[in-house]
Structures are given as C-alpha cells and as structure tokens.
Image: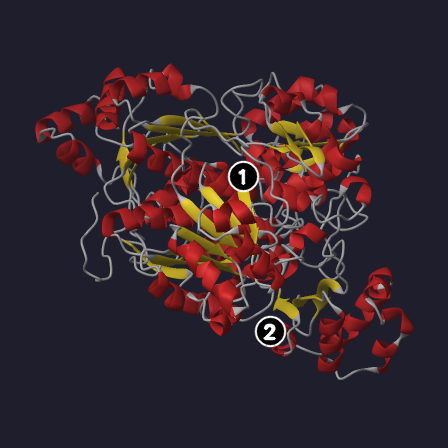
Amino acid sequence: MSLQALSGLKVVEWSEFVSGPYCGKLLADLGADVIKVERPSFGDRARRCGPFPEGIPHLEKSGLFLYLNTNKLGVTLNVESASGAQLLKELIKQADILVQNNPPRYLDELELDYEHLKNVSPRLLMTSIAPFGQTGPYRDYKSCNLISFHTSGIAFVNPSDGVDDTEAKPPLQGPEHQAGLLAGLSAAIGTMSAVFAQQMTGLGQHVDLSEQEALASITRRELAVYAVEGMGWTRLKGSQPGMASDIYQCSDGRVYLICFHDRTWESWLEVMGNPEWAYSELFLDIATRRENWDAAKVMIEEFTREHTVDEILRATEPRRIPCKPVNTAKQLVESELLAERDFFAEVGHKEAGNVKFPGAPCKLSETPWSVQRPAPLLGEHNEEVYCGRLGYTRQDLVRLRAGGVI
Amino acid sequence: MSTGGGTQNTVQKLPLEGIRVIDFTAVWAGPHVTQWLAVMGAEVIKIESRLRPDMIRAYWNLQSTGHSINSEFAEFNYGKKGCTLNMTQPRAREIVRELVGISDVVTENFGGAVMDRWGLGYAELAAIKPDIIMYAGSGFGRTGPYKEFPAFAGIAEAFAGLCHLNGYPGGDPRPMATFGYADVTSAEHGALAILAALHHREETGEGQYIDLSMTEVVSSLLFQPIMDYTMNGRVQGRQGNRDSVMAPHSCYRCRGDDEWVAIAVSSDEEWRSFCDAMGNPAWTGDERFRDALGRWRNQDELDALIGDWTRNHAHYEVAEMLQRVGVMAGPSLKMEEVIQDRHLRERGFHLDVDQPGLGTWCLAALPWRLSDVPPGNYEHAPELGEHNEYVFGELLSMSAEEIARLEEEQVIY
C-alpha cells in the first residue's frame, strides 16, 4: 500500500457523536493512524443513532457511526477510573495528536485537560472541540445542532430567499448534524496547522475549536456588510441584497435557476420563447428586475410548471444558464454525474454488511482517499492496541475488563 | 524547517510561514481557501487584472470611495498580497511561470479549463516545479460532464440535496441561509486537502493535483440522508427546527422585536429541570408530556405552551435561565447581535482591521485558535495591484524600467 497523505501521523481520538469523530475521520481517511477510544459496553452515543438497516437499532449497524468512523482502530476505555486515565495517558504518549470533544468542565474534573496532559507529553498537539470553545462566558453551555445554528446567526438569515411573515416563519436551523460536521472540519484544519507549527518549534499546542465560531464564519459576508455598510440582513423578503436566484416548480420536480444577470436573462427569455411579459419595463435591466423579481418569478414558474426538469436542463445547459435539479437523496444516489465521478464508496462491514456512502470529498491525485478498514466494532482492537502497542498481556486485559477499566 | 531547539518561548512564527501561494481564485469559495492559508502565515499572492478584477470588488459603494475594496472583498481577502497580470498576454503567462518556480501552491477556481488554455495546467506547472501542489475548485469537478460549468453555491447545494432538507415542515425546499454554505464548506475541505498535500510533500518531496467539486463536498456532508436511502430506500424531508428524536426542540418567540430563543430537551432529567425553571406551571404535569415519546408525539401543543412562557422574556434571559440548570438553550442571534455578543467578543472572533484610507473595519476572524502561535495574519486586504512592486521588483528582481515597460504594454495590468 503506497503512502497516504498523512501516513505516519498518530492520533488518539477521545470523542463521540459528530464533531470529534468527523475530525478524526478526516485525518484517518487521509492516512493517519487513528485510535478511537469509546466507553465500555455503551460506546460512542452515535451508535444509538440512525439510520439503521430496516430501522432496527443495533450497536454495530448505525449509519451515522459507520460513516464517521471509517479507517479507525477502536478500543474501549473507562477514562473515569484511575487505571483508565492512566491508560489514556499511555496512549497519548505514543501519539502525536489527541482529538477530543468532551465538555470542558468534564476534562477539568478528570484532570485530563491540556494543562495536565502537556505535562504527560510536552509534544502533544491537542485539539479540543466544544460548542462554545474552551474559554468565555458560554464555555460550559450545553448545545446541539439547533443551538449552534441559532447562536451563530445563520438561523436568523435562513432561508436565504426570505419569508413574507417573520412571525409565522421563525429563524431556521440547518439540516441535522451540519453544525457538528463544520466544527469537525474546522478542527481538522486547525490540527494540521498545529502539525506545521510543531515542525518549526518542536512544541506542543492546544487547538481550541468553537462550534459557534465555525458556523458564524459562514455568515461572514452578512456580518461584514452589516458592520461596515450598515446594511441589515434578515430573513424578511426584500432585506437580502444580492443575487435573486430561485427554486422553481417543474411538472415532475424542481430546479434551482439563476437567470437574473443580463446575459443569462436574455438566454432564458429565449428558452421561454421570448414571451411578451418579459419585455415590460419592469424587467428591462438588472436594477428593475431586482425590484420586481417576485412578479417575474410568478411568470417564470408558470412556464417551468409546463415542463419537466429534464426539458429545462436540456434547454439551459447548452446556453450556460446556471440551472440544476433540486435533488433528493434518491436522485443523488442515482445521479449519473456522481457515478461518472466515482463519488460513492461501498464498504463491507462485519456486522452491517455492505454499506454504500459518499466517498472522497475531494480528489487528491497522488494520495487518493480510500477506506482501508470500515468503522470498528466496539472494542475490536483492544488486543491489537493494548497488547500489541502498549505491551499488556491478554491476562492483563481480562483483569482490566473485569475491573471495568476497558 | 528544523525544530527550534529546547527553549520554551512562545512561538512567534505562524505555521505556514515560508509557504508561497499563487492565487487565481475569485469570488467566495476560492478566496476563502487561500484566506485560511494566508491567516496561517502563507504568503498568498492574488493574481487579478484591471481587465478582470475579482468581481467582488465591484459590489458595494465602490464609486464613492475611490478604492478598489469593499467590506465583502475585505472579509474574504485580508492577509493577502495583490498583483495585476493581464493573462491574455503571453508575456504575463511567462511571468506566472517564473512565479510558480519559486512557489509551493497554485490555486484556481475558474469556470472551466482556463488554466489549461493558458498553458498553465498541472502537467505544465509540474514541469516547472515538480513538487508543486495545484488546487482546482469547481462546481462539479474538473472531470465529468459538467467540468466546464461555473460554480454557484446555490446550484451545488440544490444538486447535492441540501435545499431539499432545508425549510419549514410541510413547506417547500428553500435555498440555504447566506450565500456561502457550499462556498465555506468547500473552501475548508480545500484548505485541509492543501495542508495534507503539503504534509505529504514534506515527507516525500511529492506534489499533487487537487480536484474539488463543491457538489461533492456538500453531498459528503449529507451522508446521513444518503445512507437512509441506500440502507432503507427512505427519502428524508424537511424538519424545520424540529428533530427526529428530541422534544421539545424548536425555536420560540420572545418578548422583543423578531426575537427568538432555541431550546432543546434530550432527557427526562433535562425536562424536569426545564419545568422547574419555568416555575412548574400546571400544564407541565399533563400526562401527555410525562415521557420522551409523549412529548415527541404532542409537540405542537407543547411548543405552543412553551411559546406562551418564552413570550414574556428576552432571548438571552431564557437562554441563561435554562443553561444554568443544564438545559440546552441559546438566543437566535441577529447579525448585530452576533457582532455584539459578549462571548464572541471575548473569544476574539471579531477583528478590527485597518484598511488604509478606508478606516477600521469590523471583520470576522477565522475559527482558528492555537495556544502558542500568534493570533494570525489579519493584515488588510489588498487594493488592486497593491503589491506589484514587491512581486515583480523584489520576488522576480525586475528593474523599475522593466516594470514600467510592462505596465505600458499592459502586461502588468
């Protein structure tokens, strides 16, 4: 097996659910050696989350867990016991990086926070992911996808095409798990930057990732325009300056169509057969179109409703009018484009069987993404890691298990 | 890049110091990639032209200031250097080849194979500098049936299934908030890929080509509904502020103007604490709300009752009350509130960037905090061609005469 991009980097991942595991996955999928530490018997709480095959919960068949934990070795460890904490430290001493997403106060209580761990391993690069980071007034706040989206400001401007009645249509969270994924992704970047920092100094580092900030970063355009130009941005229709791009109903689905700018507007008029209404002075140039866009939308949709998604695509693609279908998961999985791009991966798992899910998020030419091993069974690599790497015997493992340490 | 020895001084250098990036990206997704690299200390040289400046420069109030920068441009381009090269001229492309020879990374996000047409595709660049890392961001990838299409975040999001999952229950699919969800998520995957490629190059001396499709990035983030389909043939829909498991779990109206608070309860224990915080109104004793399943099934009524309570309070107030007793809650922040939020302020998420001639602008930092590294390179965003003298005079050692000639010939233009 040829070298992968992050071959040689050793990671201990002491995290669960979405954000920490996604950070660990990103590193593992790029070739880092990642040992995932889970609670004995209970494991990562993601194991209790669907989707499950046929909707039947099973600790080893959670779709959420299976995707987020590819390429990792899995061990069980009760970190709250003194012996467990000791074992964790031994694992850390052999690693370059620790990724964790436990509540900050929990780490303080266990004396496993960065201040303590850096004494165990001065070279340690520790990435801590928390809803509001490791410092500040909200440090100990509890959170989830909903809270992260709302406290980041994204919810307040969602949906981006605006609503008529802000009382009836509250600010909107994004789809499930997106907040945790963003946090994990930003954490992976931070982790890699710490690797680079260490090359210069040999020193350890604490990477402090706040999920709220990871999401707030997405609203930077809105924040800048508000802070500097004083232009308020809300989800009320008409308050959003910028591109008027829209979703239109077709006879058999929907398309997302951007036909607003001069060049694309003219081409789009061609597609619609140059209807008279479009030549009204209401729509003559970009400024008046912006003002009267709601009216234009109604007329455009009268047209699209008479056509299939396919017909609209066949008319817009050769004219380079930005237009694509509003797909569901089904259409995505059946997409010819994604098949041609070899986007999906199918991985065999001991308990769950063959599982199909997204493959590489992007393509690296020399060190391509690959699944070397599926997500681990609970405690699957206890022997390989505790005996093989830390030098314990099998009898030791029996004792540790009996003592509730692993 | 050897270790600095045994001293325990705080590091003064940034992690990517010494890395040079030749940056052809424009608009949002591409510049956000190189923004991460710039903040981490890489020297990012943004290549534009007077014929074709980054289109974001043309938004907002340009005429009145006489500068080529507005807040939106600054928000995506601080920390970078800017130079102008008229790429329609063969001499300009030669100059780019010289720059590549002294650089580590080349980035682009053109709508189509523009770099290839300029004779600056990966094969050509690798011939100049074998360990070059080239990043190509696009809407649908640099191979495949849509490789010539320009990228738009909304389009990528629609295709990838995000719009279908975004919106109010019982309502239509809606475009995702802000104009940047696909842009920022793609940019971060791009930055991560570049860092991984740089790491690999450190170890092996080998460069490579990174082909990033925005649609694929967003699709990969939607693995869960995808797997619900591949495992069970189930097509998930829109949940709004609700959740597949937790209840109550929604956004509730507060006292102020368009003011809301988000609340989520995930256990019986949290439910009891929540009821206590509300002062145990009689309705909380209702049979239907006694357990998690009951609360989930009777959410509509539960939400209405909770809303009656939250309406009497401010959003920050509710959040603090509930967090104090261990219940997940947070104010739904408006843009101005994000800027004023005391937690984000204390964390240093908001920056004061001095834009010469324009004033001090409040811009958003990156979610990047390392303990023993300076906060980051948050230098002002460059005016069009601001660093021509540095790039051509210093880096390429051109004489003042030569630069003047090239400006006259509209090569440096």
Q: What is the secondary structure assignment of the residue under circle 2?
A: helix
Total of numbered circles in the picture?
Answer: 2
Q: Looking at the image, which is closer to me, B175 or B213?
A: B213
Residue at the spot x=23%, y=28% of the render?
A: B99
Instruction: Report the Cα–Cα distance between label 1 and label 2.
Output: 42 Å
Q: Where the N terminus of chain A falls, by quadrant?
A: top left
Coordinates of residue B341 in the picture (x, y in percent)? 50, 68
Image quadrant where residue B407 sits: top left
Residue named by callout 2: B316
Q: Sort mark 2 into few (<14), some (14-19) or many (20+) by Cα contacts within 10 Å.
A: some
Coordinates of residue A201 in the picture (x, y in percent)? 24, 52
- Name the subunit of mark 1: A
Q: Looking at the image, which is closer to me, B35 or A227?
A: B35
Say how the picture is coloured: secondary structure
Give amino acid for label 1: Asn
Q: Looking at the image, which is closer to me, B127 or A203?
A: A203
Q: Sort mark 1 into few (<14), some (14-19) or many (20+) by Cα contacts within 10 Å.
A: many
Image quadrant where residue B364 sits: bottom left
The reply to whether residue B63 is in sight is: no
In this image, B255 relative to B185: left or right? right
Give amino acid for label 2: Tyr
Residue that sits furthest to the front in the current view: A395
The reply to whether residue B406 is in sight is: yes
Q: Is residue B95 above or below residue A45?
A: above
Q: Is residue A57 above or below residue A169?
A: above
Coordinates of residue A263 in the picture (x, y in percent)? 55, 25
Residue at the spot x=17%, y=38% of the render?
A: B390
Residue named by callout 1: A71
Q: Where the C terminus of chain A falls, by quadrant?
A: bottom right
